[in-house]
Image (cartoon, rainbow, N blue to C red):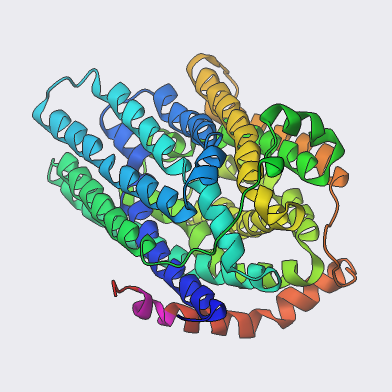
Amino acid sequence: MKDLKKLKKESREASINEGNFAAAQFAFGSYYVAPFAIAINASNSIVAMLSAISGLLGPLSQMFSYKLIEKYPRKKIVSKAVLGEAILWLPLIVIAILFYKGILTNLLPLMALLFFAISVLSINVAMPAWFSWMGDVVEEKHRGRYFSRRNLITGFVSVITAIAASFLLEYLKTKGIVMIGFIILFTLAFLSRLISWRLFKKQYEPKIKIRKKDHFSFGDFLLSCPKTNFGKFAIYRALMGFAGTISASLVAVYLLRYIGFNYPLYMTITLAGTFISLFTLELWGKFSDKYGNYRTLAITSMMIPLIPVLWILFKSSIYLIIFPATFGGIFWAGFNLAANNFVYDNVRPEKRATAISYQNMLIGIGIFLGGGLGAILIKYLKTSFIEPIATIFILGAITRIIVVLWWVPKLKEAQNTAKYKGTKSIKKMFLKEAKPTFQHEIREIMTIGKYLHLK
């Protein structure tokens, strides 16, 4: 029997391997759900509702996850949910075939929305279990660096595969058979997730004992939110979800319909931020490990409200790649990394699965309302002096500013950290550490090959 330390180390490495195939599934499939909806003539409102529906139904399914964790191993829950997500790519393949054949074309956008919603329900059942599982595998003092490394490698795989897929899609579009492209991509997404499922089954899961006294109801959670650091954080995330999705749900519509970019350009702009963020993840990880996750959240939160306005200033592809996409990628990378670790800092291991499901429920409600508002505004808002979609982006920016200014000061750091000295600390970390960090990340990317195996 291997010792516990070695089992955990192997599980962390295996998680990166699995994450690469999950990233491929995302790149071949999830990234292209909105473009697919546009290609089958879905309305702007339905495209916006893709974000709204996923935001609500995902966390709703997580609400029941803690009950599963009380009865079944986390590994079993995750494995079955991942298999279910893989299988649910098949109906989308059928929808693409039906559209290609000209069958039931008026109903297909709603069918796509329905099966996408079911897929979201399936995978989100596993999220609290996976989050709890990884929290027991990764030591507290190394979480920032480990997850930044994992995100670096899986993110690089995601970017490369998604851009390659966009060229395939555009080529088939020029041949008048774009639906064949979506059929190929969704088939690859299905196969990638099957491999991911197989790799999950090979990972080690530490035992965890969930006691009845560790459980707390959603009502109890809501009542405690204004009184606890984690509760305030959950409210903040929910309001940021609302504010962010007002405009974020319409980015695909803006780039593909309003500006008229082709698939490679659309995907390059969409993923430019992700690509640049790969080279800042380790810096954010080091920064949060040293100065705390609250400090990282505070800095990134002040920058994020600028992103929607940057989208609408100019329509040049070069501008869109350099500014809103790259700027957003850098600061969202730090925000998301710190937000996940903030939960680990503020919630005990035995309560994490329940706490994360309740937090995600609040976030989901916020995303649903934000995406729903975006869908309503894009359908009914009429402005003469500025394009309606630009007005929606400005509204999203203003809402984010209000949320950040009101809620960030209410949060606090839960861990002992180094003394933060304002811009001096930022310069020391991001200028002094930048070059060796980038060199290290390039070396990490060069090792991707060793993770792409099925042993």
Q: In the image, is 108 to the left or to the right of 159? A: left
Determine if the magenta segment contains residue 450.
yes
Q: In which quarter of the image is residue 110?
A: top left
Q: In the image, is 409 to the left or to the right of 316? A: right
Of residues 110 and 361, the one nearer the viewer is 361
**Residue 386 in the image: above or below residue 165:** above
Q: Quadrant of the C terminus?
A: bottom left
Q: In the image, is 297 to the left or to the right of 370? A: right
Where's residue 121, x and y in %? Answer: 43, 35
Q: Quadrant of residue 429?
A: bottom right
Determine if the magenta segment contains residue 227.
no
**Residue 288 in the image: above or below residue 91:** below
- At horizontal 27% and vertical 34% (from top left) the residue drawn is 39
Outermost residue toward the left in this view:
101
**Residue 306 in the image: above or below residue 390:** below
Magenta-highlighted stretch: main secondary structure? Answer: helix
**Residue 29 in the image: above or below residue 115:** below
Q: In the image, is 191 to the left or to the right of 427? A: left
Where's residue 413, x and y in %? Answer: 84, 57
Where's residue 283, x and y in %? Answer: 66, 72
| Residue 339 makes an appearance in the image | no
Q: Which span is picked out in magenta?
A: 446-451
- At horizontal 73% and vertical 66% (from top left) the residue drawn is 288
Q: In which quarter of the image is residue 91?
A: top left
Of residues 344 and 303, the one nearer the viewer is 344
Q: In which quarter of the image is the N terminus?
A: bottom left
